[in-house]
Amino acid sequence: MTDEWRGWREAAQAALYGDEGFYRSPSRSPEGPAGHFRTSVHASPLFATAVVRLLTGIARELDSGTLALVDVGAGRGELLTGVLAALPEGLEVTPYAVEVAARPPGLDPRIEWCAEPPAGVTGLLFANEWLDNVPVEVAEADADGVPRYVHVRTSDGAERLGTPVTGADAAWLERWWPLSVPGDRAEIGRPRDTAWARAAGSLTAGLAVAVDYAHVRGARPPFGTLTGFRGGREVRPVPDGSCDLTAHVALDACAAAVSTALAHASTELTDQRAALRRLGVGGDRPPLSLAATDPAGYVRALAAAGEAAELTARGGLGDFGWLLHRVGFPAGPP
């Protein structure tokens, strides 16, 4: 790490994924991502159960009892562990954890640990809060309304404006996140578009799902969303390897990238509340009469309802974007 000024994409890449980066260094983050932020995976096992229902639907449509489950940005394998524990009889799943960090000790030996999504598999590719950690450039409109790259200093996160945005980045801004008012900022999502199209393209047949903090054109945040997380708290983003660096995802741009790259794929963009409700996670309270006939069952059902409510809450996890691409079978939800 140095004090040189550089673009946010280069700085975040080193801070997150360099040899001493936040996601690679055991000394910086020994407990993994779960020690710094709470995802839907950590909130409730109901999330893994919903993923199992996705797998079951894919298996039924493809008439196959054997599928791959590719977890992109797998952390310490928490989602795969939960899915393997909840699989129904008759469904065989080959689990792949795609992650830059080293394989954690004690992980289920059935889980294959890899640096990239395996090519040519059939099944479900699932990326929960992965794209928000794909580093991107940050742009800001100067006093004349000209978008310029934002440069950052590694040591303290100080920023200054650099050169005007040109080329493919300028074209992306014009299409997806136009800037003209001085001080307005944007995260240029081209690397995420490319990464997601490549990941979805690794499937021969099945479903690719990206779940993330998201926004769409017409509702972009005027000052961007770049921030940091450390120890469960939001902190100022400093690219020194000491914190997570994240920015919300322009999922509509990612969707268009896949539509261009995979002409045969169908696309749906929805939110977590709608997606999970379709998968049986609703948050409805159990009937009070159950407390009289089965008190223990009532308590379990009430706890599950509380967890489901958190996963689908407006203003919280329920607002996460779900981007789904069906590859290799007819259009329509699984």
Image: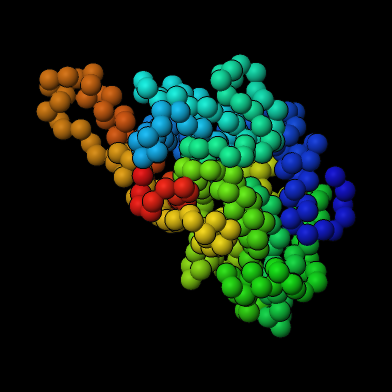
**Residue 130 visible in the snapshot:** no
Residue 300 vertical placement versus 220 (above, below): above
Name the residue rendered at 75%, 67% in the picture: 149
Task: Please name the colour scheme applied to the rendered image.
Answer: rainbow
Residue 291 visible in the displayed image: yes
167 to the left or right of 183: right
Query: Please, is residue 242 above or below residue 239 in the view?
Result: above
Quarter location, residue 144? bottom right
Horizontal placement of 115 versus 324: left or right?
right
Image quadrant where residue 55 sits: top left
**In the rendering, at what x and y percent does residue 333 appear?**
35, 49
Image spot of residue 270 (x, y percent): 40, 55
For the point 69% across and 52% down, the residue is 135
The residue lying toward the viewer, choosing from 59 and 280, is 59
Task: Name the one closer to the observer, 310 or 87.
Answer: 87
Picture coordinates of residue 209, whole percent (x, y) = 48, 46
Picture quarter containing residue 158?
A: bottom right
Q: Residue 278 appears at what percent x and percent y?
A: 31, 45
- Outermost residue toward the bottom? 144
Image quarter in which the N terminus is found: top right
Left or right: where does residue 262 sit relative to residue 63? right
264 or 128, which is in the foreground?
Answer: 264
Residue in the picture at 69% in, 42% down: 243
Instruction: Assign the C terminus to one quadrant of the image.
Output: top left
Q: Which residue is drawn at 66% across and 43% down?
A: 244
